[in-house]
Image: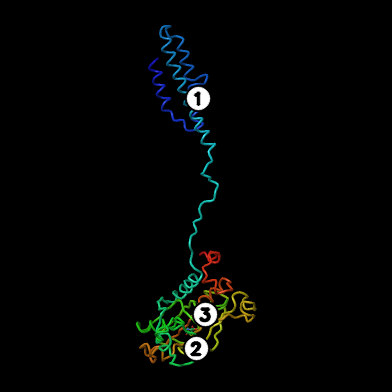
Amino acid sequence: MIEKIKDLMAEVETFAVDTKEKAEELRLKYLSKKGILNEIFAEFKKVKPEEKREYGQKINSLKTLVESKIAAAQEALEDQLSKPNDLDITLPGPNHNLGSHHPITMVKNEIIEIFSRLGFTVAEGQEIEDDYHNFTALNFPPEHPARDMQDTFFIETNPDILLRTHTSGGQVRVMEKQQPPIRVLVPGRVFRNEAVSARSHCIFHQIEGLYIDKNVSFADLKQTLMYFAKEFYGEKTEIRLRPSYFPFTEPSAEMDVSCSICGGKGCGICKNSGWLEILGCGMVHPNVLRNCGIDPEVYSGFAFGMGIERTAMLRYGVTDIRMFFENDMKFLSRFKY
Ligand code: DAH
C-alpha cells in the first residue's frame, strides 16, 4: 500500500492543471466520494494498529498534495482572468492596403490591349528629346508657326534639347530603326509649358499609333479607329472625322466619338454637342517617311495620337485633370481592378 501511495503522489505531481476543467478532473478523481482517497481510507481501516501512524501520514500528505495542487491552479487561473487581457480578438486587424494600378495606367493598358489584337506592339520613346525628333523630322520646318501649337519646355543652355511635347517623336525613332511593315504604339508622358487648370496640365500622357505598309489607305485608318472606339466606348459608339491640320500628316483629321455619357443626346460632358473629341490622326506625310529613310513611293501609312488623361476622365467621370497627379489615396483607391 505504501508503494501504491508513492505512485499516486508521482501521478498527482505530474498532472498538468492548466484549465478549470483539469482542476475539476483532479478533484473528482481524488477527493470526491468515489475518489481514490476515500478508497484508500477504506483500506486504511484494515491496516494493523502499529502501522497506522506511518500509513496515516502518507495518506495525509497525498491528500494535502492534491488539495494544494488544485488550490494553486485555481489561484493561477483567477490571476489570469483578473489581468487585463491584451489580446482582444474582436479588434479589427491591421490594415493591409494592397496597391492597385493608377487610373492612367489602367486606361493605357486597356488601349494597348485593344490595338494589340490588331497586331500593334509597344515601343518606348524618350521624354528628353531633341528638336529634330520632336519637330524637324515630323515636318515642322524651323521657324514654322506650327511649332507654337505646342508650348515647349526647352533647356536654357541648349535649345536643341527639350521635354517632348508629344509622343509623335516616337514614330520617327521607330521608323529610323525599322523598315515596314510597322504597327506600333508609343505610350508615354509628355510636357507642355501651359498653365495648370482643371482642364489642362503641364504634364500629361499620350498614346501614339503608327501603321506603315504597302497600300495603307485612309479607309484602313478609319476602320482601325472605328474598331477601337467600339471596343473601348461600347458597341453603339459612332465616330466622326473632322478635317484638321498637323504638319506630319496629310490629310489630317480629328476624331470624335458619340458621347458615351448621354449616348449622343447632349449633356454637360459633351457640352450638349453629343460628340467628344478624342484624338488627332492622318496619313503620314511623305516628308516624314522620307526623313526616316522610308520610300513614300512604295509605302504609305497612318498615325494617330490621343491623350490618356482625357480618355480616363471620360471613362471614370473625373472632372479635374489635376486629380491624376496629386496622389490622393482617397481618389486613387476608387480605381481597383
Ligand atoms: N501629336 C499630336 C498632338 O500632340 C497628336 C497627333 C495628331 C498625333 C495626329 C498623330 C497624328 O500621330 O497623326 O496634338
Q: Are marks 1 and 3 in contact (CB under 8 Å)?
A: no
Q: Is residue 294 visible?
A: yes
**Which sits in the foreground, 64 or 207?**
64
The answer to whether the beta carbon of the residue marked 1 is less than 8 Å from any atom of ligand 1 is no
| Measured Cα–Cα span from mark 1 to mark 2 | 96 Å
Q: Are marks 3 and 2 in contact (CB under 8 Å)?
A: no
Q: Which coloring applies here?
A: rainbow
Q: What amino acid is labelled 2 in the image? A: Asp
Q: Residues within 10 Å of mark 1 (few under 14, many from 20)?
A: some
Report which quarter residue 176 is drawn in. bottom left
Residue topped by disc 2? 148
Element at badge 1?
Answer: helix
Q: Residues within 10 Å of mark 2 (few under 14, many from 20)?
A: few
| Measured Cα–Cα span from mark 3 to mark 2 | 31 Å
Q: What amino acid is labelled 3 in the image? A: Met
Residue topped by disc 1? 27
In this rendering, the answer to whether 330 lies above or below 12 is below
Residue topped by disc 3? 226
At 37% from the left and 90% from the top, the residue drawn is 295
Picture quarter with the N terminus: top left
Q: Nearer the viewer, mark 1 or mark 2?
A: 2
